[in-house]
Image (tube, helix red, strand yellow):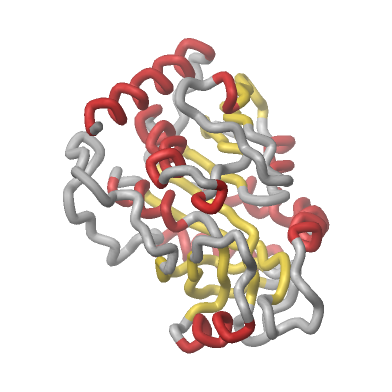
Amino acid sequence: MKNLVLDNLTEAVSFIRSQTSTKPQIGLILGSGLGAFVDQIQVTCKIPYSAIPHFMSTTVEGHQGNLILGQLGNKSIVILQGRNHYYEGHSMESVVFPTRTLALLGIETLILTNSAGGFGDTMQAGDFMIIEDHINLMGINPLMGPNIKELGPRFPDMTEAYDHSMISAMEKIFQNMGTRYHKGIYCAVSGPTYETPAEVRYLKLLGGKAVGMSTVPEVIAANHLGLRVGALSCITNLAAGISRQKLSHEEVTETAKKVEQKFSNFMKTLIETL
């Protein structure tokens, strides 16, 4: 099993390298409705997930399902335009396979984004939250099973799962932009149902400020691989019980669409300063 994972990763990396000479330094995973950032970069290569060996096509609206390589200023970057989720029935190995592929392509820094439900005090739909830490409530960990020592240690440290210097850089950019933002703990759940009001009250008691169904598996895999990690949530809706209206994915994608220009400007500045 271990050798099969490494063989599959090697095959995926070899295929991508056969399509482009770009050697990325920075990786970016874009969440629901946030894929328009690619308009900011000079694209050198665009590959549908369906063409890459062992990648899974995306099925959720707002996840375009492309791997994009290109330049932003003097930085070479690789973008995952959309992701797969555990709730879609994928194994955790499949969920983190693209993250591991980016690491083996040579990136040293990974930035993850997602759409999340917010329940922090003063949060509004359309705000951003810099993720300082997470609580994994998905009931599973992508590193369960035999350790693949070629990818990292058996017991990786998660003391600074989210790089402190990147958190500071993100905060300064939002301040300079005059954009509403928060810092807080992201709670990861399996989904696909949205949380009940009682569950949101529980997450708030745990110290969380936002909840979603992604990101944490990739962050764990990235830390295992020794990458520098930063993550950002777009608060696309207030969590159940905070808002009186019922939740829908349409609301999530609509809000992400409204803030995509602010998001794109922020991400462009962040990458340029790294």
Q: From the top left corner, tell me how far across and down residue 120 is, in percent.
A: 60, 82
On screen, residue 238 above or below 112: below
Picture quarter containing residue 9?
Answer: top left
Do we see residue 42 in this rendering? Answer: yes
On screen, residue 199 above or below 258: below
Q: Is residue 193 left or right of residue 144?
A: right
Q: From the top left corner, tell me how far across and down residue 29 is, in percent.
A: 55, 44
**Residue at image coords 40%, 16%:** 14
Picture quarter containing residue 149?
Answer: top left
Seen from this angle, which residue lies furthest front? 89
Q: Is residue 102 left or right of residue 180?
A: left
**Residue at image coords 81%, 78%:** 245
**Residue at image coords 63%, 83%:** 197
On screen, residue 209 above or below 138: below
**Residue at image coords 46%, 15%:** 15
Count of labels shown? 0
